[in-house]
């Protein structure tokens, strides 16, 4: 299983790195860069929801938190975003630990409600931020940017290095973040750590009787997933050069959650498959704005009904068993 996953991962990475050589349009490069951001988020969300079984809806809050911290450090302290980016990831880890502690005594739907409430409180705090924090010429600016969004904190400097091809620098940086996030997810899922997460998900009483601490492992999975989610938020801020409250919209949370479900909850490659599928579906419905949400909902319903294990789960359960080796000695002559 590990060898197969490594081969698949290297093949996907090579394909993505080779895309710019095909001279695609700027729009395609931009969409693929956005795919890297969403796929990074859902890869880590899959760890929390699919592997550890924690019904958290705080992933977009961690994403926004990492992005805002990265932007604020660049704006208020004058740091290059290269240095602000890992700080944003670590800030998301600290925020996730607070969320994890608050969720320790809760289960199931109560965790979902609490984490959703945290996201909505963040959204309200940002859009109601009207206090003057500093003067930009004759304009009064808010701490978070308020409804206008946080801006003027710089970017990753690829415009000075690559000129008109600056977007390729962002493309490769986004691919690198996704590759690291996927590698971390792969290692965790296939390691004893992932087994401990699944034990707590499937039978907490038995897992605790075997010495697996729910407190320790729940905070650990929150922290690991938050770091890469925060990095994705910081990269989003640097790529688009604006960080706004739209990153906390409930519709975006549901869109990303759908990627996890469509791809296959708890599967290594499920988040990537789900992100690619729903982004393609979303692109197909862009010409039909009034039916866009309806179309995405229909795709979601079809996958839940026809492929309840998701794309990755269906492939693993139907196609891969045909390629398994026969048991040792089967079909061999004896005597």
Image: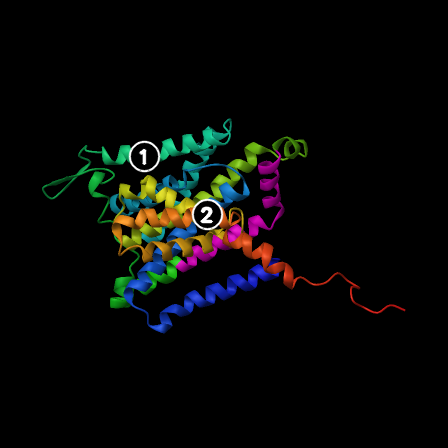
Estimate how packed mark 1 is, as few (under 14), some (14 to 19) or many (20 or more) residues with alpha carbons within 10 Å: some
Which quadrant of the structure image shows residue 120?
top left
Question: In this orientation, which residue lies closer to the viewer: 61 or 83?
Answer: 61
Position in image of residue 265 (x %, y %): 51, 46
21 lies above or below 322:
below
Position in image of residue 128 (x %, y %): 22, 32
331 lies above or below 223:
below
**Mostly what secondary structure, the magenta segment?**
helix
Question: In this orientation, which residue lies closer to the viewer: 248 or 180?
Answer: 248
Q: Which of marks 1 and 2 is in front?
A: 2
Position in image of residue 49 (x %, y %): 49, 41
Label 2: state its secondary structure.
helix
- The reply to whether the C-beta atoms of the residues labelled 1 and 2 are less than 8 Å apart is no
- Separation of disc 1 and disc 2 at Cα? 23 Å
Q: Is residue 42 visible?
A: no
- Residue placed furthest toward the top: 105
Position in image of residue 18 (x %, y %): 41, 70
| Range of magenta residues | 175-203
Task: Locate residue 250 relative to residue 333 in the image: left or right.
Answer: left
Q: Mark 1 points at which residue?
A: 122
């Amino acid at each position: 299983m590990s060898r197969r996953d490594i081969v698949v991962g290297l093949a996907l990475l090579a394909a993505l790195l080779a895309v710019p050589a095909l001279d695609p349009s700027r729009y395609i490069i931009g969409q693929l860069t956005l795919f890297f951001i969403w796929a990074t988020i859902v890869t880590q969300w899959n760890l929390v929801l699919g592997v550890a079984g924690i019904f958290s809806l705080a992933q977009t809050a961690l994403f926004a938190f990492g992005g805002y911290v990265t932007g604020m450090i660049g704006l208020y302290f004058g740091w290059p975003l290269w240095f602000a980016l890992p700080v944003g990831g670590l800030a998301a880890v600290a925020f996730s630990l607070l969320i994890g502690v608050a969720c320790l005594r809760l289960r199931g739907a109560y965790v979902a409600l609490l984490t959703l409430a945290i996201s909505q409180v963040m959204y309200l705090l940002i859009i109601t931020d009207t206090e003057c924090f500093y003067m930009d010429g004759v304009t009064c600016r808010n701490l978070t940017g308020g409804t206008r969004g946080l801006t003027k904190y710089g970017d990753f400097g690829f415009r000075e290095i690559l000129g008109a091809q600056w977007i390729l620098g962002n493309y490769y940086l986004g691919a690198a973040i996704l590759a690291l996030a996927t590698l971390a997810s792969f290692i965790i899922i296939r390691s004893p750590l992932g087994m401990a997460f699944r034990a707590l998900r499937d039978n907490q009483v038995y897992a605790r009787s075997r010495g697996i601490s729910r407190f320790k492992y729940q905070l650990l999975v929150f922290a690991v997933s938050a770091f890469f989610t925060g990095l994705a938020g910081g990269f989003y801020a640097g790529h688009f050069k604006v960080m706004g409250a739209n990153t906390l919209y409930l519709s975006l949370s549901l869109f990303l959650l759908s990627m996890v479900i469509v791809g296959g909850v708890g599967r290594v490659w499920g988040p990537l498959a789900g992100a690619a599928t729903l982004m393609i579906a979303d692109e197909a419905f862009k010409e039909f704005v009034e039916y866009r949400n309806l179309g995405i909902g229909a795709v979601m319903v079809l996958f839940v009904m026809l492929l309840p294990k998701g794309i990755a789960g269906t492939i693993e359960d139907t196609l891969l068993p045909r390629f398994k080796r026969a048991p040792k000695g089967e079909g061999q002559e004896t005597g």
